[in-house]
Image: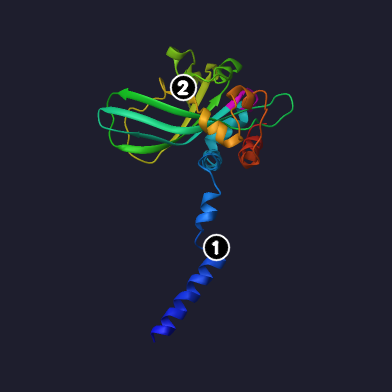
Amino acid sequence: MTSKRQLLLCLSLWVISTTGLVPSAAAAEDISDQQELVQRAQSTFERFLTEPGIAAWYVSESPNVKAVFIVPRLWRGAFLVGASGGGGVLLARDFVNGGWSPPAFYRMTSGSVGLQVGADASEVVLAIKTFSGLERFYGMGTVKLGLDGGLSLGPYGEDLSASLDVVSFGATKGAYIGLSLDGFAITANSGDNERYYGKPVKPEDILANKDVLNAGANGLRGALDRFIH
């Protein structure tokens, strides 16, 4: 009986491994943290565009969108004193040749004081509508969102969104009170950029000069091109 059970167990494990129901360690290692972020960014953007109101906004504002910044998971949490953060990618539109630039990697952070309850993860998409706003992201330093940082920012649905540098879209599953992207900081992630492209590279070289490419981002670039063109 014991031999039969062992035989069945071995057979079951062989079937699982050959059918791909359980990914192998080698397969999991094939996807870098940067590639995983790119893929999650694509899923976030495509999911946002399933909402009719957001899709309609992008259709009407398509000529004005200069770049899109996507944070698939922005962690927020604490009580009374909150801290937020998450990795994101920025892609710039190519108005000369069409299409979109490769993604540049950034880190979005904020420390805030105010009424906040619980902890959760949000998905955030920023539509950058001005060239001056986009150019702020070309450097290696930190860009601060909001009027204090020289960028006008407002959430999707506001009447004044037409005159803003950046329009924000968010989706949150957990309970949270008092979130505002005003004052958030976005900093170029030179380490992720180097790892993804195999050499040190500045954000401007990715977004404007397009000196580097990674085929792993083709899905994300194609998704943006389908909705914003």
**Residue 106 at x, y percent in the picture:** 50, 29
Amino acid type, callout 1: Gly
Query: What residue is pinned by disc 1?
Result: 20
Amino acid type, callout 2: Gly
**Depicted 181 relative to depicted 12: above or below:** above
**Residue 205 quadrant:** top right
Q: Could you tell me which secondary element the residue under label 2 belongs to?
A: strand
**Residue 101 at x, y percent in the picture:** 65, 30
Q: Could you tell me which secondary element the residue under label 1 belongs to?
A: loop
> Residue at left 47%, top 33%?
87
Q: What crowding class fits label 2: few (fewer than 14 Cα within 10 Å), some (14-19), or many (20 or more)?
A: many
Is-magenta flag for residue 172?
Answer: no
Q: Where, quadrant-wise, is the C terminus in this rendering?
A: top right
Is-magenta flag for residue 65?
Answer: yes
| Horizontal side, residue 167 vs residue 174: left or right | right
In this view, the residue farthest toward the front is: 199
Q: Mark 2 or mark 1, which is nearer the start of the sequence?
A: 1
Query: What residue is pinned by disc 2?
Result: 154
Q: Residue 1 or 126: which is nearer the viewer? A: 1
User: The magenta stretch spans which residues?
Assistant: 62-67
In three-dimensional space, the C-alpha distance between marks 1 and 2, rounded to whole angstroms, equals 45 Å
